[in-house]
């Protein structure tokens, strides 16, 4: 009986870890998409004349930092 409970506990822990990993991936994708949106908005504002190149560069730097840390998988989705 103890062996069965140990296996069930291991399977439950494995499923929990996979669920946490998926949640982290989704959060990273959302953060990347938000940064991409901010870059687009900064660039658009700059082109229209009411934004600054500095704001565009800051948005680009934030996006590049996110990609360096978490990868660019969100760009393919």
Image (cartoon, rainbow, N blue to C red):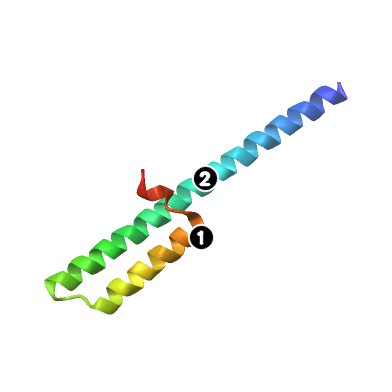
Q: Quadrant of residue 2?
A: top right
Q: What is the secondary structure assignment of the residue under circle 2?
A: helix
Q: What is the secondary structure assignment of the residue under circle 1?
A: helix
Image mark for residue 17: none
At horizontal 13% and vertical 75% (from top left) the residue drawn is 49
Image x and y of residue 53, in percent: 25, 77
Q: Quadrant of residue 50?
A: bottom left
Mark toward the start of the polypeptide (1 vs 2): 2
At horizontal 49% and vertical 55% (from top left) the residue drawn is 70
At horizontal 45% and vertical 65% (from top left) the residue drawn is 65
Q: Quadrant of residue 58?
A: bottom left
Going by the image, does 13 lie left or right of 4?
left
Mark 1 lies on residue: 69
At horizontal 75% and vertical 32% (from top left) the residue drawn is 9
Assign the N terminus to one quadrant of the image: top right
Q: CA distance from mark 1 to mark 2?
A: 17 Å
Image x and y of residue 68, in percent: 48, 61
Disc 1 to disc 2: CB gap under 8 Å: no
Query: Up-down: is 19 above or below 65?
Result: above
Mark 1 Cα-neighbour bin, 10 Å: few <14, some 14–19, many ≥20: few
Image x and y of residue 47, in percent: 15, 70
Query: Up-down: is 64 above or below 21?
Result: below
Q: Nearer the viewer, mark 1 or mark 2?
A: 1
Q: For this rendering, which residue is in front, 55 or 76? A: 76
Assign the C terminus to one quadrant of the image: top left
The outermost residue toward the left is 48
Q: For this rendering, which residue is in front, 55 or 5? A: 55
Going by the image, does 30 lie left or right of 3?
left
Mark 2 lies on residue: 23
């Amino acid at each position: 009986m103890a062996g069965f409970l140990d296996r069930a506990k291991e399977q439950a822990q494995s499923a929990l870890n996979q669920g946490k990993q998926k949640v982290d991936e989704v959060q990273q994708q959302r953060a990347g998409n938000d940064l991409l949106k901010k870059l687009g908005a900064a660039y658009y504002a700059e082109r229209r004349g009411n934004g600054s190149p500095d704001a565009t560069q800051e948005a680009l730097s934030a996006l590049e930092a996110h990609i360096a840390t978490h990868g660019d998988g969100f760009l393919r989705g």
